[in-house]
Amino acid sequence: MLAIGEVVTQGEKRTLAQYFPTPAPVVGRLIALAALEPGMTVLEPSAGSGAIATTAARGAIVDCIERDPGYAAVLSDRHVARRVLVADFLTGPVEPRFDRVLMNPPFTRGTDMAHVVHALRFLKPNGLLVSVMPWTVTEQTDSTMAFRKLVEQRGGRVEALPARAFAQSGTTVDTVLVAIPATRPGGVRPTVWPVRDIPVRDAEELGSPADIATEIVADLRRAVAAFEKVASGLTRPAPTTVLDGIEVS
């Protein structure tokens, strides 16, 4: 505040940095997908205050990268990470020495995909990345085409998270978990992309076929009656009146 003459609230800071802490239920599911084993090495890039790292550290050896010095200090004070590097993850050196990369990257303008693709370079050949990502990566668009192809080529897995899973963190963006192996495992099943549930009307709501047919016939009869009324009006001679000795139709 003294340095810049402004006060920035925690909410404003999170929004500007696209930092929305990972809620405990999401962390739990992410850790389950990662299939962590004791002694594994784990990287959490763009770690924030370390919601994922804190849980992963219960048995694994965790390194964190965080560009914000304040959040990095929080991580250091918690003593959950073996190493906390203050740096921009996308510009730092690649170190392919981790069994797992667990992450919740920024989402703005496709940066989530850039972060995940870069993070894959940090895995050992038999490693696995699991990341929170926005629902938009499940949609087939020009901007997601290359990323979706990468996930499918690696035999990745995509799992939808509950609606509003991050509401307590300040965002209602729909999210998924994406698990991507460093190399495609043998015998892996094709990637299945989740789809949004589309409400379907119950059969009882639509009525039986007989009721529907009766309703259609009634509508047709009303339409025919309306046309007959119009036709009758057209066939009758137009009435005439006399104004100042001139007939007017």
Image (tube, helix red, strand yellow):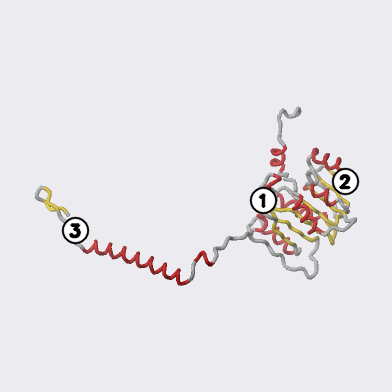
Q: Marks 3 and 2, Cα distance to the nearest angstrom?
A: 96 Å
- The crowding category of the residue bearing disc 1, from other C-alpha atoms within 10 Å (few below 14, some 14 to 19, many at least 20), is some
- The crowding category of the residue bearing disc 3, from other C-alpha atoms within 10 Å (few below 14, some 14 to 19, many at least 20), is few
- Residue placed most toward the observer, 107 or 159: 159
Q: Marks 1 and 2, Cα distance to the nearest angstrom?
A: 32 Å
Provide the residue designation for mark 2: 83
* In this view, 79 is above or below 207: above
Q: Secondary structure at mark 1?
A: loop
- Report whether 126 appears left or right of 248: right
Toward which corner of the image does residue 33 lie, by quadrant?
bottom right
Provide the residue designation for mark 3: 238
The disc, 3 or 1, on the residue closer to the chain's N-terminal end is 1
Q: Nearer the viewer, mark 3 or mark 1?
A: 1
Q: Nearer the viewer, mark 1 or mark 2?
A: 1
Residue 121 lies, in percent from the top left, at: 81, 55
Q: What's the amino acid at mark 3? A: Ala
Q: Name the residue: 63% across, 57% down.
A: 141
Total marks shown come to 3
On residue 71, which mark appears? none
Residue 30 lies, in percent from the top left, at: 77, 55
Q: Secondary structure at mark 3?
A: loop
Provide the residue designation for mark 1: 164
Q: What's the amino acid at mark 1? A: Arg
Q: What's the amino acid at mark 2? A: Arg
Q: Marks 3 and 1, Cα distance to the nearest angstrom?
A: 67 Å
Q: Residue furthest left?
A: 245
Position of the C terminus by quadrant: bottom left
Q: Residue furthest bottom?
A: 210
